[in-house]
Amino acid sequence: MAPDATPADIQAVVSMVELAGGEAFVSRGVSRIVIGLVGDVDLFATLNLGAMRGVSSVTRISAKYKLVSREHHPDRTTVQVGGVPIGPDTVTLIAGPCAVETPDQTLQAALMAKAAGATLLRGGAYKPRTSPYAFQGLGVEGLRILTDVREQTGLPIVTEVVAADDVATVAEHADMLQIGTRNMQNFPLLQAVGAAGRPVMLKRGMSATIEEWLMAAEYIAQRGNLDIVLCERGIRTFETATRNTLDISAVPVVQRLSHLPVIVDPSHSGGRRDLVLPLSRAAIVAGADGVIVDVHPYPDIALCDGPQALVEEDLTALSATVRDLAGYMGRRIPVSAPIAA
Amino acid sequence: MAPDATPADIQAVVSMVELAGGEAFVSRGVSRIVIGLVGDVDLFATLNLGAMRGVSSVTRISAKYKLVSREHHPDRTTVQVGGVPIGPDTVTLIAGPCAVETPDQTLQAALMAKAAGATLLRGGAYKPRTSPYAFQGLGVEGLRILTDVREQTGLPIVTEVVAADDVATVAEHADMLQIGTRNMQNFPLLQAVGAAGRPVMLKRGMSATIEEWLMAAEYIAQRGNLDIVLCERGIRTFETATRNTLDISAVPVVQRLSHLPVIVDPSHSGGRRDLVLPLSRAAIVAGADGVIVDVHPYPDIALCDGPQALVEEDLTALSATVRDLAGYMGRRIPVSAPIAA
Amino acid sequence: MAPDATPADIQAVVSMVELAGGEAFVSRGVSRIVIGLVGDVDLFATLNLGAMRGVSSVTRISAKYKLVSREHHPDRTTVQVGGVPIGPDTVTLIAGPCAVETPDQTLQAALMAKAAGATLLRGGAYKPRTSPYAFQGLGVEGLRILTDVREQTGLPIVTEVVAADDVATVAEHADMLQIGTRNMQNFPLLQAVGAAGRPVMLKRGMSATIEEWLMAAEYIAQRGNLDIVLCERGIRTFETATRNTLDISAVPVVQRLSHLPVIVDPSHSGGRRDLVLPLSRAAIVAGADGVIVDVHPYPDIALCDGPQALVEEDLTALSATVRDLAGYMGRRIPVSAPIAA
Amino acid sequence: MAPDATPADIQAVVSMVELAGGEAFVSRGVSRIVIGLVGDVDLFATLNLGAMRGVSSVTRISAKYKLVSREHHPDRTTVQVGGVPIGPDTVTLIAGPCAVETPDQTLQAALMAKAAGATLLRGGAYKPRTSPYAFQGLGVEGLRILTDVREQTGLPIVTEVVAADDVATVAEHADMLQIGTRNMQNFPLLQAVGAAGRPVMLKRGMSATIEEWLMAAEYIAQRGNLDIVLCERGIRTFETATRNTLDISAVPVVQRLSHLPVIVDPSHSGGRRDLVLPLSRAAIVAGADGVIVDVHPYPDIALCDGPQALVEEDLTALSATVRDLAGYMGRRIPVSAPIAA
């Protein structure tokens, strides 16, 4: 649709498509609205949609994904998360604890993150765990801790949601909703976050192809949400020296195929603290739009993934790395809000 | 718990554990009730639980999965689905269309299934599809078609559920709830079906290890449901000649580790009609407790996975195969209810 | 070429092709000779090769593999190994120790194999080992032990060759040359065994696709040897419960694509004794033309792969299994020569 | 052994070990000689080897690899190739055509390589090809072209050897012997190059674990050659968007485990020209000691892997990248010899 298309214009297109027996999915991005059509493409071609008011252009697409494809959106997208950009002009550092455990641990981790140059805070209140006997997260209590820490540090919050029923609650507290690797093909959850009015970080399924990942993003986009950030976090292979194998090539490959931003999680892919720095460097020069890392003030007693969390001295190095290599790639680091008094 | 343990006995154990700061999960199987404890194991050891009324034995376990492990349940389990057994004494054939499309197509497929010796009807009303543009299933309307066909054929229904919110509705219509490969680690969904009072078929995640699969089953068991049937359906590998690689070794491996029944889906693993028969034979003699296959009266126009659906003539061969090889393995085929007049 | 083609006829075809700037590869099977042409196919078409003496038919092929393809050889091949057939009419059991260690151990294993119905003896004199510090085989001394045991038991020998330089020596002693999984793409070795005048067993590379496996067979065929038996022995996947994942589907898939026999190695794929029987059963009913298993009289002190070797009591069960399921598949078991006095 | 140990000292140690029924493997590196012992370690402990003349220290090792392990050689090794270092102080660029086709093509590619800052020339005269119908390389003629081009450009040569029988010939012409991915576990070949008196580049098997890769290096080291450079070139996974998946994490992981240099091949891992630059950048900042890339003056008519070869304009960018990021990592680029008049 054209930038000045009105709600009535949009509704007119949708109605026309539905009259023709098709389905129309309206996706709202920061700077444009796209309507995806599904149904009898030949019939649609007879409707003369291009002449309708507010329509900018009509394109016939046969790819498996449309709304997230770069084919017809050559400019790469910038997603805004609580005022912090993730996109082609920046390298955005997201940091925080794997799991929210206590107010103190979360605040300490957030202060570490901020000191290291992070402008977004990650932290899990709902944790999908392989074992039913592992710590499952604090739930709503964890969300409240996160919003308190946001108030104290000014860092917008990225947090995971694992059930469609929780989406409204999480969206109320968080600035960005994260879909974890095990839920990449949880289609009802994708549809729920697609309708939640919050930017979404979609982690790659640990055995998903790039095409399947983009089709999962399409599920979200189709519900009207184009504010999606893709996150490469390692794939499952035969190699056991690392928890998963970071598919660094996925960064440039995805950026060719899709206009969406792509960030890298070097903490979960390697599963080892000593790999976070070299993999973060690799991610940035491979073109990643950001890096998301685990930090923990006391990793030895972390309830979740302690062995991969960065500690104080690593963060100084990470901070310098992100700054230097972002500069090398011609990008800037987003500026963080000052810590609230 | 002992066979004659009363609800009050069970509650007493649960209360004792909770007083000690632990959690107690009560799992009800066909013939026994097991209470799983999580928390300070050393403290539990001081509680003298073994002396409480209704307690049969107390076992200290450290495995990643407990309730589904064979370690303390040497006898393999038989799960009853609408009166049809799946377990060590039988080879149960489950057949039906991949997706429920129309009443006629479903009935025809069910009659084909029944003629081939199937005693359970499979058919999807809710379909998790990789592409948002693919047929997503008929939903509640599909469930109604299935219950109509059950009435006409006497075949109990196995059908997939993809969202926790749908569990109650599906459980109301179906005899067995199926968790698909993409949802094997959708933990809220596992917990919901664990509490739904219906037997569950848990398909293996296409890139899940056997250990992760059993931990997923443990999620269901922990909510009180031990009527779980595991279904091997192929894993993701580098080989592209087949859709996935059937891990036939998983059948004996799982049967060593768990008391739960294991069946095989040769249709989805191979993705090719010509492989269904040889893989069904292989499954039965590897020790599978059943086989689940796609059938379709008009596979060329199927909305889902037509290329792998068996047709009339294949079914005659399959029927003979199941009968002969079940006999070779010292098992019988469950008897189907007569077709309602 | 026609069955009555003379060496002069063959040479004439080869010369003609070479005159046209092409290459001609003569492959001799048990019952036919095939000449594969490489070069300017359009030019070849002008040569009127079909009219030359001794030429039966000329076929233009563009597949990645030609000589081993079933496309133009619809009848499946039977390979004779020291008088023992491997092909579509039989289920051939090959058994013996993983490695030849001593004369006594080899003889005892051979007698066990024979008692179980095996008609070919396997045993490694040259062992490719992942670690340079592991037992590497006895070399020529091992070959001599094998030929002594052949004399004592009447069992023809299948043994591995790992270096092109050893091919002549091994071919002098053995009835069948085995190419191991790590050498499936050792092209000089493939070419050497292709020219050695002995049947070849080509194990699938542990991460080779079926197409790559058939192209490796084509290397052997191209040097004039069509007496090739393919052996599925498990592929590398993420699953760690078994050493490799037996790709049981490969049996029917390969039999569609190639006229060559396919056997299965359940010992090396699973790496566990308790899986050998169920996987052998699965292999036979999936259509395998034979099974190759490890046996060892004293597995606890085996220098190589002891944990997967069958012992006495397993063999009785295996023997019955092969006999019964071969019968079920409409095949017979080859008859073994009597033990020499 | 101590730096001033004499051949007689070495022989004395070897003889002592052999008297004790063990085996001794003498490995000569640039700056030290190591003797690896295999056999009864407890018996060796009684020999008082540490007191023998020329012995610097004795260490008891139980790892699967010893000579290549970093455990007892904390300093990382620099390998010299025709005067060009590959090691921790430099980022060495190796470039050239995938296959040597003609003198002109090879010279043009070498000049391109040199202009881009490469100090070593790669080029294959012996090509291991999956299909027997693909171009197999020029053999000795290709080696002669390479030595001519070396004379014209001053670039030492890295070239592949695929058969033990060819090792002497290739070693006579080349400055470094390359073992390709399909031969990583061709143990006779590893042993032959281990004894050839030339540095070796050992590519990772496309489905080899890091541990297996290091054990393959150990085979070479055990024959007396510690001048080994490891080359990560992508592993086989389920992802099909790239030819293989570059395991970027392998760089820091291997450098923790082994003292050997590690370089990265971004051309073969991705199989796409557009990925060579981003993956080269990622490799350098992940800590790689060098990068090896395909270049071709006329990629559209290349006989081998044309789609991944860099062309002129890419090379200017690559040159700047290597220089800048080497500097960022505190390393220098080796200086190339001037082009011969």
Image: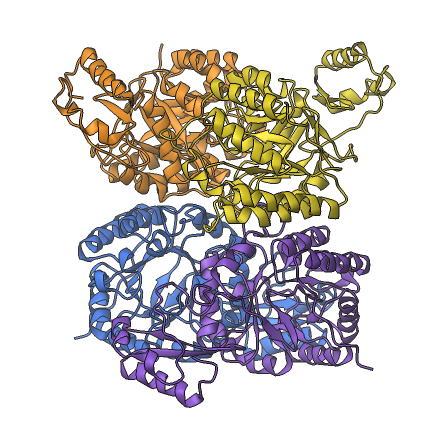
Chain colours: A yellow, B orange, C blue, D purple
- Check the image and report above or below for B168 versus D29: above
Kindly give the residue lying farthest to the front in the view shown.
A341
**Residue situated in front as seen by the camera: B252 or C256:** B252
Image quadrant containing the N terminus of chain B:
top left
Note whether residue C205 is visible.
no
| Residue C279, horizontal then vertical, whole percent | 33, 48
| Residue C310, horizontal then vertical, whole percent | 24, 56
| Residue A279, horizontal then vertical, whole percent | 59, 48
- Check the image and report above or below for C152 versus B87: below
Q: Name which quarter of the figure residue A157 lies in.
A: top right
Note whether residue A220 is visible.
yes
Horizontal relation, residue A144 to residue A334: left or right: left
**Residue situated in front as seen by the camera: B335 or D128:** D128
Image quadrant containing the C terminus of chain B:
top left
Horizontal relation, residue B13 to residue C55: left or right: left
Horizontal relation, residue B182 to residue A57: left or right: left
Residue at x-position 16% and y-position 19%: B3
Residue at x-position 39% and y-position 35%: B213
